[in-house]
Image (tube, rainbow, N blue to C red):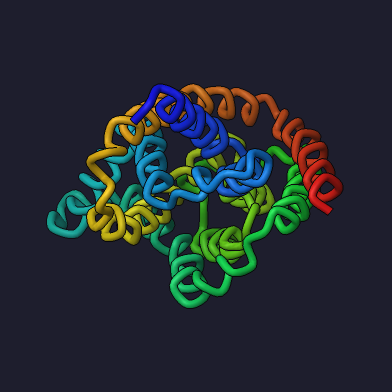
Amino acid sequence: MNLITIIKYTILGIIQGLTEPLPISSSGHLLIFRELFNTNMFNDLNFETIVNFGSFLAILFIFRKDIIKLIKNFFTFIFQKEKRKLTYQDFKYCLLIIIGTIPVGIVGFLFKDKVENLMSVQAVGIALLFTAIMLFLVRNLKGTKDDQDITYKDAIIIGLIQMITILPGISRSGTVLVGCLLCKLKREAALKYTFMLYFPVSAAAMLLGVSDLISDSNLNTVLLPYTIGMLAAMIVTYFAYLWLSNIVKNGKLWHFSIYCIIVGLFVIFYFR
């Protein structure tokens, strides 16, 4: 494995790390770069699984305290009746995560292969314009609901909205953030719930790709660049999330709509 290949995989890891938490579609950007540079390297599903794992670890580290607390109190509520009043809110929040995940899980299971056939650079361009419109429409929404105020109805609505993220080029984080804001969640609560929904969806996608990764006969030869790409994705995802968090809290999420419009129009006209 030569140095140029390692550099290319590192760049791919950086692209994944930057675009995963931001509302601009990581899968869409990988497809755009694949078409721009006319290389199948951007269509390496095994590498995509690896770099997604890097992003997953970064987001997991950021929310580690919340996750540990939620899991602990979820089981405490179930097995210790005397502590149910103290742990009810965290138990409910876990249920909200499950409810919000079910719709996209069902749609992904039933239509994943059909949706992948729709994947094209033109579709990504259109999807980016759609994302731009969504982000712009919620630019002034602040919301009044904290974590404990999210209802089961909100979770269902947000879950149904999340279903469209299986379409090529639709940003999962951007779409779910929009759904949360439309349900009147405060910006901080919307950001947290968005990435809590990220964990089960991302974990399921990685599990589906593990079997192909293990059976890859060339795994030993690409192990080093894969690992470097994963580390690059992990580090960049961490800082990209911090950047996104600051933007959301300051009500500047609509700035990404400008980027999505520019890239979307470029893609549509360049690849005509």
- Looking at the image, which is closer to me, 67 or 106? 106
Image coordinates of residue 32 in percent, x first then y, are: 66, 44
Q: Tell whether 214 sits left or right of 156.
A: left
Number of numbered discs: 0
- Please, is residue 17 above or below residue 107 in the view? above
Residue sitting at the far front = 2
- Looking at the image, which is closer to me, 262 or 165? 262
The residue shown at (49%, 43%) is 41
Image coordinates of residue 150 in percent, x first then y, are: 51, 52
- Please, is residue 81 above or below residue 177 in the view? below
The residue shown at (30%, 59%) is 212
Q: Tell whether 80 sits left or right of 111.
A: left
- Looking at the image, which is closer to me, 202 or 245? 202
Where is the C terminus found, in terms of image quarters? bottom right
Can see residue 185? Answer: no
Q: Tell whether 255 sits left or right of 183.
A: right
- Please, is residue 8 above or below residue 221 in the view? above
Q: Tell whether 227 sits left or right of 261.
A: left
The residue shown at (35%, 53%) is 206
Can see residue 46? Answer: yes
Where is the N terminus found, in terms of image quarters? top left
The residue shown at (35%, 31%) is 225
Image coordinates of residue 57 in percent, x first then y, are: 33, 35
Image coordinates of residue 178 in percent, x first then y, are: 66, 48
Query: Residue 60 lies in what quarter of the image?
Result: top left
